[in-house]
Image (cartoon, helix red, strand yellow):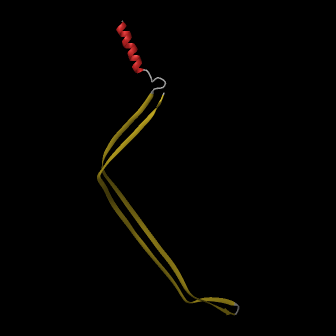
Amino acid sequence: MKQVLGLAILATLFASPALAGETFVLNQWTIKGSKTETNLNIDTVTNSNRTQDYSSSSNKIYIDGEVETEYNNGTVTKTLKDFTVQSVGSELNGSFHEEMRTRVWGTINTIMNSYTSTHESSAGIR
């Protein structure tokens, strides 16, 4: 029993904090590192289709000539001189079709390294 009590007292003395008036020094380094690797394989295909139909038309009527007025014994007679009627038209119809295929493929490899180094030191008298 005496031996156990003596051992407990010695352990308490070694584990106890520094007493007043004692000096202490703390010098601590911490170094951490990490590495992340990513391998990304890409293979993507995009298909697109476009269809366009169009139509346009134009019509024009052109009238040319003179109107002559005759007065004869109180009656009025109107006649057309060199009278011309022109009618012009045009029409355009069509369509457009486009098919596209786009493919992107490859590999993206990334490596990220991260390092942290810290140092802590202190000294003093308690």
The answer to which image quadrant residue 11 occupies is: top left
Q: Residue at x 38, y 62 (%)?
A: 51
Q: Residue at x 36, y 64 (%)?
A: 97
Closest to the observer: 35 or 96? Answer: 35
Where residue 61 appears, as percent x and y from the top left, is: 52, 80
Q: Which quadrant is home to the N terminus? A: top left
The answer to which image quadrant residue 26 occupies is: top left
Where residue 58 appears, as percent x and y from the top left, is: 48, 75
Closest to the observer: 89 or 68? Answer: 89
Q: Is residue 80 above or below residue 116?
A: below
Where residue 53 appears, as percent x and y from the top left, is: 41, 65
Closest to the observer: 63 or 10? Answer: 10
Closest to the observer: 69 or 97? Answer: 97
Q: Residue at x 33, y 61 (%)?
A: 99
Residue extending farthest to the top is 1
Q: Is residue 114 above or below residue 6?
A: below
Residue extending farthest to the front is 21
Q: How many marks?
A: 0
Where residue 7 appears, as percent x and y from the top left, is: 36, 13
The answer to which image quadrant residue 92 occupies is: bottom left
Residue extending farthest to the bottom is 72
Q: Residue at x 53, y 82 (%)?
A: 62
